[in-house]
């Protein structure tokens, strides 16, 4: 029998975006197949319906639901969807110990558990459930779509392949020797953590960015340390456990993406450093119900919150794609 952990959830509005009074909001919890209790924000359309189409939203990798996943969820609720934005296992307000650990298996399960939860709500049409994943969770959304036939539309926004980047590095720059040395260091860290009885953190986004840093590093700093800092966000603070990378290094994602029959939309920015991830994911897909949307002049973090002017997220295109997929 599944037993949900009693979580201490913040009651006040502590998001990095304004509350829309035209959308209903409440905190909820649900559990995954590994027995971990997850915390989420539910956003409910103003228009009352007997059954709503629903969307589960998560991301970015190392973010919390008070950042951009919540922004997406609230916006899609304005457009008629009942939505939840959830914190993954071991992070944010969700349960699971030790804290700040990630796994492609458990995190794929987190998305499936969100679909379980939505499917069991009386006011949700269980045949009209979609998912939106952002950044590393865009890649995990595609991974989830490979196994979960209940998902009627999958939206991957500015996606990373976390297995690929942990193994091969940015732009696949790691040599075989680099990879072996990395494995050695991470396995040494396991012993250190075991002896200390705690997991050492790898560090979040850089707080002090040198002038010659890549633009995407500056972009992460401007978002996570600047306009969307949140005290529970891993990226805004101490980051993931160092050894979290091990499971991604050793587990490929998207091996069965070609089997996905339901619609998939991959959204990337024209100027995003991570664009190659999305384009390569798209190449794995089959069928004429798959689409790659490149947003002009947008970089990676512009698709988190729309950028400085809040105008870069193609919500109209996302809404249109999902509604067409459901019909």
Image (spheres, rainbow, N blue to C red):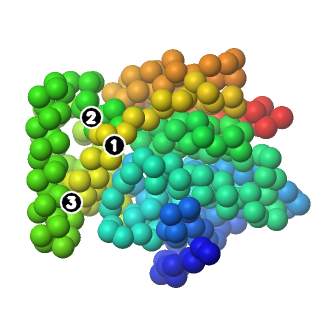
Residue where numbered disc 2 is placed = 167
Q: Residues within 10 Å of mark 1 (few under 14, many from 20)?
A: many
Do we see residue 185 in this rendering?
yes
Do tag 2 and tag 3 residues touch (Cβ < 8 Å)?
no
| Residue found at x 45% / y 49% | 105
Going from N to C along the chain, the mark reached first, 2 or 3, is: 2
The quarter of the rendered structure image containing the C terminus is: top right
Instruction: Tell me what residue is drawn at x 51 percent, y 48 percent.
Output: 108
Question: Mark 2 against mark 3, which lies toward the viewer?
Answer: 2
Front residue of 182/67: it is: 182
SS state under label 3: loop
Which numbered tag is attached to residue 248?
A: 1
Secondary structure state at the residue bearing disc 1: helix
Closer mark to the observer between disc 3 and disc 1? 1
Calculate the distance from the C-alpha at mark 2 to the C-alpha at mark 1: 7 Å
Viewer-proximal residue among 34 and 201: 34
Q: How many neighbours does mark 2 have within 10 angstroms: few (below 14), some (14-19), or many (20 or more)?
A: many
Q: What residue is shown with label 3? A: 201
Q: CA distance from mark 3 to mark 1?
A: 16 Å
Does residue 291 lie above or below 25 as drawn? above
Q: Is residue 231 visible?
A: no
Please report contact status of discs 2 and 1: CB closer than 8 Å, yes or no: yes
- Secondary structure category for the residue under label 2: helix
Give residue 286's position: percent from left, percent from top: 62, 19
| Tally of numbered discs | 3
Q: CA distance from mark 2 to mark 3?
A: 19 Å
Horizontal and vertical percent position of residue 156:
54, 36
In the rendered view, does 175 fall on the left or right side of 240?
left
């Amino acid at each position: 029998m599944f037993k949900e952990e009693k979580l201490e959830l913040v009651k006040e509005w502590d998001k990095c975006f304004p509350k829309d009074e035209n959308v209903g909001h409440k905190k909820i919890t649900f559990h995954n197949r590994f027995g971990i209790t997850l915390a989420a924000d539910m956003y409910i359309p103003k228009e009352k319906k007997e059954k709503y189409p629903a969307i589960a939203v998560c991301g970015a990798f190392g973010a919390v639901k008070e950042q951009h996943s919540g922004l997406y969820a609230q916006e899609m609720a304005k457009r008629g969807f009942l939505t939840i934005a959830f914190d993954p296992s071991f992070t944010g307000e969700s349960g699971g110990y030790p804290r700040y650990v990630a796994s492609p298996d458990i995190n794929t399960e987190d998305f499936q558990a969100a679909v379980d939860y939505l499917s069991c709500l009386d006011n949700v049409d269980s045949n009209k459930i979609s998912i939106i994943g952002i950044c590393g969770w865009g890649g995990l959304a595609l991974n989830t779509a490979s196994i979960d036939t209940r998902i009627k539309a999958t939206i991957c926004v500015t996606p990373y392949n976390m297995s690929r980047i942990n193994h091969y590095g940015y732009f696949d720059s790691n040599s075989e020797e680099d990879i072996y040395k990395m494995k050695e260091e991470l396995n040494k860290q396991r012993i250190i953590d075991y002896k200390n009885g705690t997991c050492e953190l790898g560090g979040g986004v850089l707080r002090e960015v040198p002038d010659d840093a890549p633009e995407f590093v500056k972009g992460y700093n401007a978002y996570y340390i600047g306009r969307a800092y949140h005290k529970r966000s891993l990226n805004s603070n101490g980051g993931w456990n160092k050894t979290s990378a091990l499971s991604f290094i050793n587990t490929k994602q998207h091996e069965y993406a070609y089997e996905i029959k339901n619609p998939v939309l991959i959204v990337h920015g024209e100027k995003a450093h991570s664009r190659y991830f999305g384009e390569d994911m798209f190449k794995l897909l089959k069928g004429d119900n798959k689409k790659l949307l490149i947003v002009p002049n947008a970089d990676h973090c512009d698709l988190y919150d729309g950028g400085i002017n809040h105008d870069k997220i193609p919500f109209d295109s996302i809404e249109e794609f999902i509604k067409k997929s459901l019909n």
